[in-house]
Amino acid sequence: MAQEIPDANRIVLDVSRVNMLFTVSDKKGRFVTNLTKDDLVITESKKEQSIIEFVAESDLPLRLGILVDASNSVRDRFRFQQEAAVEFINQVVRPRQDKATIISYDSAAELVADLTGDTEVLAKAIRGLRPGGGTALFDAMFYACRDKLMQDQPRHKFRRAMIILGDGDDNASRYTRDQALEMAQKADVVVYTISTNNSKLEKEGDKLLKYYAEETGGIPFFPFQVQDLTQSFENISNELRHQYNIIYRPEPLKADGLYHKVDIKVRDRKDLVVRARKGYYAPKG
């Protein structure tokens, strides 16, 4: 039975500090893990910001939302998707530290496993899924971010990530594409996407998956063969273990409810690539 998604949409954010998770890699994609606070420049509205805290976050507790497209469009490769997702959970979730939730989506979002560190419960939930129906991706994202991944506070003490396994289509949601993205940004959720489109032609759904990943500091993956799914999950696993975290107090401080763009760079190192979300929503004062 599908989990009903309530309409309430009130998120309380701390205006005095902004939390930014990010990764740094070289041009060959290798993680750079030896940076210090002085190596980084963070700007908001073209003004350099003072960093309050800076840490290499390889060990923060994870809160993962795994969204599985269970619509008719993915029927032909569904079994392999399930096994790749189970393998990922077994590799990544540390039972006494991390928690994951499994949400499937066809014509509605359905909670199939609540936040838990029990990998057997999570695996059973994934293996029990059956495809069929429409696609309500935006509703599933909105619900996962607001009602599950934001539960544990304070936010900067946890790393929140979402893995979307699907084709990026949506034909059944009440929420819009941008409402789903806004909720992910408000919840500090990094979105990783794994496309199930194996046509080798970029479709509209692929563009949407890429958009969600890039806006939140994640990565989109497009495995053309089902066997490549496992590699995509392994890359996400590596990414989750090589993140930095910056906390800064915005100057000037604005409780205007608007979206504020943020840019992070490594000082005097144009050869390094920083991947982070593009900004944040300030609370409304």
Image (tube, grey):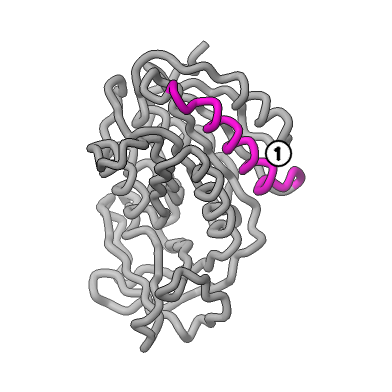
Give the residue number, with chain letter if any, for mark 1. 117
Closest to the observer, 77 or 174 = 77
Instruction: Check disc 1 and report its element: helix, strand or loop.
Output: loop
- The answer to which image quadrant residue 198 occupies is top left
Image coordinates of residue 263 in percent, x first then y, are 32, 69
> Dot 1, crowdedness within 10 Å: few (<14), some or many (≥20)?
many
Dot 1 amino acid type: Gly
> Does 77 appear in magenta?
yes
Residue 53 on image: x %, y %: 53, 73
Residue at the image position 31 percent from the left and 36 percent from the top: 199
Residue at position x 49%, y 21% from top? Answer: 110
- State the image coordinates of residue 89 (x, y, percent, origin top left): 64, 41
- Tell me where the magenta segment starts and ends, as one range: 75-96
Q: Does the segment drawn in magenta span residue 97?
A: no
Residue 265 position (above or below residue 176): below
Query: x, y (%) of residue 49?
Result: 36, 76
Residue 271 versus residue 188: which sits nearer the camera? Answer: 271
Relative vertical location of residue 198 with respect to residue 255 in this rendering, above or below: above
Residue lying at 56% horizontally and 75% vertically, measured from the top left: 33
Query: Which quarter of the picture shows residue 259?
Result: bottom left
Q: Is residue 186 above or below residue 132?
A: below
Q: Residue at x 40, y 57 (%)?
A: 217
Q: Is residue 214 above or below residue 55?
A: above
Nearer to us in this view, 210 or 191: 210
Q: Residue furthest right?
A: 96
Q: Is residue 42 left or right of residue 240?
A: left
